[in-house]
């Protein structure tokens, strides 16, 4: 068993920044990540990919190389390709892959990032349909760009992926956008605050110009979106501007925002609260990112959606507090180093009210039609879940007993938030009162062979 001052889970911007800052304060750090190379999803495989496709992915992508360089320190033990499937208070972390093992630490920082919000629509389970983030991973990691693709949904990532496809020489056939002009009008009251984060606005305008120059059609305010095709995606149909549209295509990228990945935090029974503005649960934290379980910190999008720069700043702040709590820096030194980080963090966060209001999640995907599959693992429909509510089901954990929803390989990561929204509306109660799926180990599927590798050799067995 390996011991460290601090265990960091996740090598995205928050985890990389936290590990480097903590090591700089004199802490011994173990950094564990599922991917084979550091960077998380936003800076995925940046050290290898930047020279190959940096121009396509944009100037912000290069920031990741600075962060990955920060973890090349003797006091950081980096464990890539490791899937964490159990966390115990104290803190003990068990993982498989890369030899598997158990590590312990005095403090734990969860930097597990975000998940794309599930977008259950008629036809969303057909081959040829994937999330926009998955399409971006193909581009980053392998240089693959889908031909004859349509992007459907809303939010900054949708525009970023479309702009990257244009720069890669394969523009999408169209953007089918679910936000409305009324949403943009409501967001106007936040423009003043958003100007403090003007770089985001400038980046957004640049992406829109890129799409316009490439002649990519945009359909704004789409409703009744369906993906057609008996055996695979063949077209996207939708209602917009008073008539029905059909765009024939081979690939559909869906996206309507990201939500905090809270599975690891929930496995420790850390308190969470429903964020009305972001339509998602987020952990309850103090100003340094510490949870209601002393010694457990959360930074980055796993603490609430804010983007890569804000994640980096939050990771550094959490690391300073951890170092202070372990006696490596004084409170005065902690606060001195934290002051400029907090000012930068406030600037970065200022744009979120505008973005969250202008690009809300697609209402029809938050409350899908009865015949739409919600839990893909167990093939449970939205109508099934509403039926559970009529029989007295009040929360996602009860829904497991009613119909196995959330009991497949994803353990509710994909369908859990939608189930909460469906039951909350059906029962006329808040998402907070409805709750979320209770998370127990293993957090991710683990094979019997991987479990067996963890067993200590039995000396008697050799005799």
Image (cartoon, grey):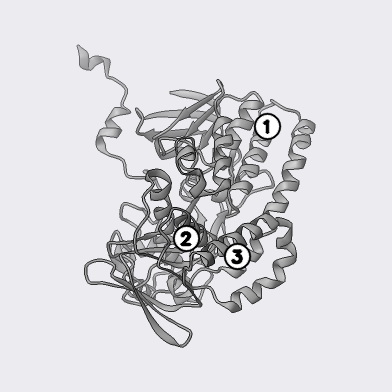
| Mark before the other along the chain sequence, 2 or 3 | 2
What distance separates the C-alpha of mark 1 from that of mark 3?
35 Å
What distance separates the C-alpha of mark 1 from that of mark 2?
44 Å
Residue 208 image point, x, y percent: 56, 64
In the structure shown, which secondary structural element does the residue marked by tag 1 occupy?
helix
- Residue 113 in view of the camera: no
Residue 81 image point, x, y percent: 39, 35
| Mark before the other along the chain sequence, 1 or 2 | 2
Residue 48, numbered circle: none
Residue under circle 3?
Answer: 356
In the structure shown, which secondary structural element does the residue marked by tag 3 occupy?
helix
| Mark before the other along the chain sequence, 1 or 3 | 1
Residue 120 image point, x, y percent: 38, 68
Residue under circle 2?
Answer: 162
- Residue 347 in view of the camera: yes
Residue 35 image point, x, y percent: 41, 38
Which dot, 1 or 2, sits closer to the camera?
2
Callout 1: few (<14), some (14-19), or many (20+) C-alpha neighbours within 10 Å? some
Residue under circle 1?
Answer: 325
């Amino acid at each position: 068993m390996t011991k460290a001052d601090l265990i960091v889970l996740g090598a995205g911007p928050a985890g990389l920044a936290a590990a480097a800052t903590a090591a700089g304060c004199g802490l011994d750090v173990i950094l564990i990540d599922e991917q084979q190379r550091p960077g998380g999803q936003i800076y995925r495989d940046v050290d290898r990919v930047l020279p190959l496709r940096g121009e396509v992915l944009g100037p912000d992508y290069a920031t990741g190389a600075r962060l990955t360089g920060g973890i090349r320190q003797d006091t950081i033990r980096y464990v890539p390709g490791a899937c964490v499937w159990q966390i115990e208070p104290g803190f003990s972390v068990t993982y498989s892959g890369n030899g598997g093992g158990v590590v312990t630490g005095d403090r734990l920082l969860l930097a597990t990032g975000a998940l794309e919000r599930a977008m259950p629509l008629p036809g969303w389970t057909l081959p040829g349909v994937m999330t926009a983030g998955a399409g971006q991973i193909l581009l980053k990691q392998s240089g693959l760009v889908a031909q004859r693709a349509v992007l459907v949904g809303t939010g900054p990532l949708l525009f970023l992926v479309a702009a990257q496809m244009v720069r890669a020489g394969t523009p999408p056939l169209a953007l089918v956008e679910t936000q409305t002009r009324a949403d943009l009008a409501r967001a106007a009251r936040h423009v003043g605050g958003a100007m403090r984060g003007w770089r985001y606005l400038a980046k957004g305008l640049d992406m829109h110009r890129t799409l316009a120059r490439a002649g990519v059609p945009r359909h704004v305010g789409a409703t009744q979106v369906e993906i057609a095709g008996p055996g695979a995606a063949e077209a996207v149909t939708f209602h917009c501007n008073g008539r029905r549209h059909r765009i024939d295509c081979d690939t559909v990228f869906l996206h309507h925002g990201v939500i905090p990945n809270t599975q690891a935090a929930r496995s420790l029974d850390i308190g969470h609260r429903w964020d009305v503005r972001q339509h998602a649960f987020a952990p309850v934290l103090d100003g340094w990112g510490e949870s209601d379980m002393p010694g457990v910190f959360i930074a980055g999008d796993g603490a609430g959606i804010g983007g890569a720069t804000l994640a980096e700043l939050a990771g550094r702040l959490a690391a300073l507090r951890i170092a202070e709590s372990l006696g490596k820096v004084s409170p005065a030194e902690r606060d001195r180093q934290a002051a400029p980080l907090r000012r930068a963090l406030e600037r970065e966060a200022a744009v979120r009210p505008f973005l969250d209001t202008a690009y809300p999640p697609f209402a029809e995907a938050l409350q899908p039609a009865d015949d739409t599959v919600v839990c893909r693992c167990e093939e449970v429909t939205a109508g099934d879940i509403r039926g559970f509510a009529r029989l007295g089901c009040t929360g996602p954990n009860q829904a497991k007993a009613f119909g196995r929803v959330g009991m497949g390989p994803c353990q509710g990561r994909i369908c859990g938030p939608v189930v909460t929204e469906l039951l909350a509306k059906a029962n006329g109660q808040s998402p907070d009162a409805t709750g979320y799926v209770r998370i127990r180990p293993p957090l991710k599927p683990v094979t019997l062979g991987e479990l067996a590798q963890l067993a200590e050799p039995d000396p008697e067995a050799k005799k």
